[in-house]
């Protein structure tokens, strides 16, 4: 069995240390060690309290996903947790590092919890198509209330120790070593004769929530908006409802077990766990060892302050990296920096950021119209229009001013990285960093290696992506790379479908109902219709040579309907709103374009729309 638990005595305290590197998941060996350790402490009259902690940088990072679906050896998790919770001696969790999923549920079964300031707690199961299945949906509402519990569980996001204390999830934040703090906490309990405290027995908090059914109605509305089509959120809400309305803990646990089993059998669970491992697998690059030295990135330079350049700049500012942004003239620079400030101000209006946080970010941003001002940047990213000749010329300029060791990157969505690299005297320093629009929001970052890109540049770029809170994926230097190569067939089909008889709104609704966060035309409005339009203009594409699937988009751009940025695109966006409204004028424009092209329109079923949009994604992947 994998993993172990070390047992030692510290005076009258039994210290159990979970040791299952690197993150101490709850494998069969850990469960057996916990079970034996607690029993040993209970059998020792000299032991007055039990402290549980983790070895290394994690407390317990959750279930061992590699054991899902396999045979269960040794004691089950619920058996261990019941033994711990029913202990006649106080059990204190010393949360030294990450306590995710089952790790936090273990801590909730302890009678008290002490956390290190830098440690984090979280219940990420919803991101795997699951729910906390070891009592988390029943204990947490009893501790902090249904509203906070739902927000926390449905987000799946971790929070740091001080925030966990403020929410009431933990009892104390350690000042110094967390194990020593937990032992002092235990000694104090012993001295006072404090009783054990089982969360399962708490009822006052959930009793107050019984008169507030709006909590659950609001949670359903929010999850339908944020996680459309997901199965697990509704199961989580039902479990927390049971904790509040059923009252009896054991009955609530039965509801949790039933809902967990439904999630376990649902195909979304398998797909989301595949995604979980796939995102981690992309960080492994066979010919770039994990210990490859990375370059130090302390300052960034961004060329272009339009839609992409502004979003890229915000990505750096959001993690505290100073940015020098370059534009071709002062007017364009002022306009671009003004858009960045307005984007941050919108976040303040929506309560997602404070004015002080905006000031801190904006203080890190400086602008210039001179390439020479990029001389101190550790990474320079060009974010200009998709024209290879213009980009080659830009790299020649960068090469003259960038310091030795600086990474020279292109945000191109599919042009040849090697052509840009060969325009410099240092092709080993050139790489593609393709952000997706809006760059400050979208999680994907394509890292495109050229023929001569240095391994240390690749390693640095992958680590930079993680630092920017992106999922960095390494791509070869092929047309369209990965993302746009897959999207190409998808968007072409969507464009053909509307010319043949559907509307943009039918197509988007079909894709939304399938479970995508947005449809192809909503995506185009978000990204900006002008990106492709301007690229075609710069390339000198004649109107009659524009692909038929781009004809409607180009007509919209001719009317300065570029999408969300102008409050009009395929949709109409009321001032300050991201929720688009269908526009009959766009439907009329689509129908006119079909007639101009001699395409006879017909009724297209939703099933045909779905298959024609999804199959190109599957085939290309």
Image (cartoon, rainbow, N blue to C red):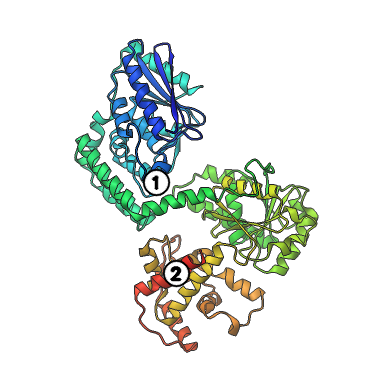
Q: Position of residue 482 (x, y in %)?
A: 56, 62
Q: Is residue 461 left or right of residue 568?
A: right
Residue at which label 1 appears:
155
Pick whichever of labels 1 and 2 is earlier in the sequence.
Answer: 1
Asked if residue 362 can be seen in this view, the reply is no
Q: CA distance from mark 1 to mark 2?
A: 31 Å
Quarter of the image with the N terminus is top left
Q: Is residue 602 left or right of residue 416?
A: left
Q: Is 536 or 582 nearer to us in this picture?
A: 536
Q: Is residue 541 above or below residue 423?
A: below
Q: Is 17 or 146 nearer to us in this picture?
A: 17
Residue at position x 39%, y 52% in the image: 270
Q: Position of residue 340 (x, y in %)?
A: 57, 55
Residue at which label 2 appears:
615
Q: Secondary structure at mark 1?
A: helix
Count of numbered tags? 2
């Amino acid at each position: 069995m994998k993993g172990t638990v070390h047992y030692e005595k510290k005076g009258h305290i039994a210290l159990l240390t979970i040791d299952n590197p690197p993150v101490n998941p709850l494998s069969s060996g850990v469960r057996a060690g916990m079970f034996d350790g607690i029993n040993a402490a209970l059998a020792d009259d000299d032991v007055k309290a039990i402290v549980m902690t983790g070895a290394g940088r994690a407390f317990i990072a959750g279930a061992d996903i590699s054991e899902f679906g396999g045979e269960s050896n040794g004691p089950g998790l619920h058996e261990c947790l019941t033994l711990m919770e029913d202990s006649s001696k106080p059990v204190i969790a010393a949360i030294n590092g990450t306590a995710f999923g089952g790790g936090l549920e273990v801590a909730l079964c302890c009678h008290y919890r002490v956390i290190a300031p830098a440690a984090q707690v979280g219940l990420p199961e919803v991101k795997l198509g699951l729910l906390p299945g070891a009592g988390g949906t029943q204990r947490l509402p009893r501790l902090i209330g249904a509203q906070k519990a739902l927000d926390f569980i449905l987000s799946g996001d971790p929070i740091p120790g001080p925030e966990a204390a403020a929410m009431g999830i933990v009892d104390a934040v350690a000042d110094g070593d967390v194990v020593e703090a937990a032992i002092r906490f235990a000694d104090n309990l012993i001295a006072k004769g404090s009783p054990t405290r089982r969360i399962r027995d708490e009822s006052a908090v959930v009793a107050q929530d019984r008169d507030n059914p709006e909590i659950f109605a609001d949670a359903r509305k929010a999850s339908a908006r944020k996680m459309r089509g997901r199965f697990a959120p509704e199961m989580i809400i039902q479990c927390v409802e049971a904790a509040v309305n059923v009252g009896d803990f054991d009955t609530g646990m039965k509801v949790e077990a039933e809902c967990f089993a439904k999630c376990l059998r649902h195909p979304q669970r398998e797909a989301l766990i595949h995604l979980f491992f796939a995102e981690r697998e992309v960080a492994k690059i066979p010919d770039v060892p994990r210990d490859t030295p990375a370059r130090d990135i302390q300052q960034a330079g961004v060329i272009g302050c339009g839609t992409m350049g502004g979003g890229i700049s915000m990505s750096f500012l959001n993690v505290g990296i100073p940015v020098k942004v370059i534009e071709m003239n002062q007017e364009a620079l002022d306009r671009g920096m003004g858009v960045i400030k307005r984007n941050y101000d919108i976040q303040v209006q929506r309560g997602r950021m404070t004015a002080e946080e905006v000031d801190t970010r904006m203080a890190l941003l400086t602008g210039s119209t001179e390439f020479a001002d990029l001389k101190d940047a550790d990474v320079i990213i060009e974010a200009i229009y998709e024209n290879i000749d213009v980009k080659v010329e830009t790299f020649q300029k960068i090469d003259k001013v960038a310091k030795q060791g600086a990474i020279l990157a292109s945000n191109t969505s599919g042009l040849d990285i090697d052509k840009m690299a060969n325009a410099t005297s240092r092709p080993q320093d050139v790489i593609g960093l393709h952000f997706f629009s809006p760059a400050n929001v979208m999680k994907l970052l394509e890292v495109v290696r050229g023929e001569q890109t240095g391994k240390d540049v690749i390693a640095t770029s992958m680590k930079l992506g993680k630092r920017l809170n992106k999922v960095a994926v390494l791509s070869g230097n092929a047309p369209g790379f990965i993302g746009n190569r897959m999207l190409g067939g998808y968007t072409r089909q969507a464009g053909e479908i509307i010319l043949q008889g559907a509307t943009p709104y039918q197509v988007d609704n079909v894709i939304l109902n399938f479970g995508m966060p947005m449809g192809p035309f909503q995506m185009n409005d978000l990204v900006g219709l002008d990106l492709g339009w301007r690229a075609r203009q710069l390339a000198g594409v004649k109107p009659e040579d524009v692909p038929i699937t781009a004809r409607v988009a180009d007509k919209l751009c001719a009317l300065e309907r570029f999408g969300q940025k102008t409050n009009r695109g395929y949709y109409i966006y009321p001032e300050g709103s991201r929720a688009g409204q269908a526009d009959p004028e766009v439907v009329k424009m689509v129908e006119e374009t079909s007639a101009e092209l001699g395409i006879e329109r017909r009724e297209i079923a939703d099933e045909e729309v779905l298959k024609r949009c999804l199959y190109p994604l599957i085939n290309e992947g």
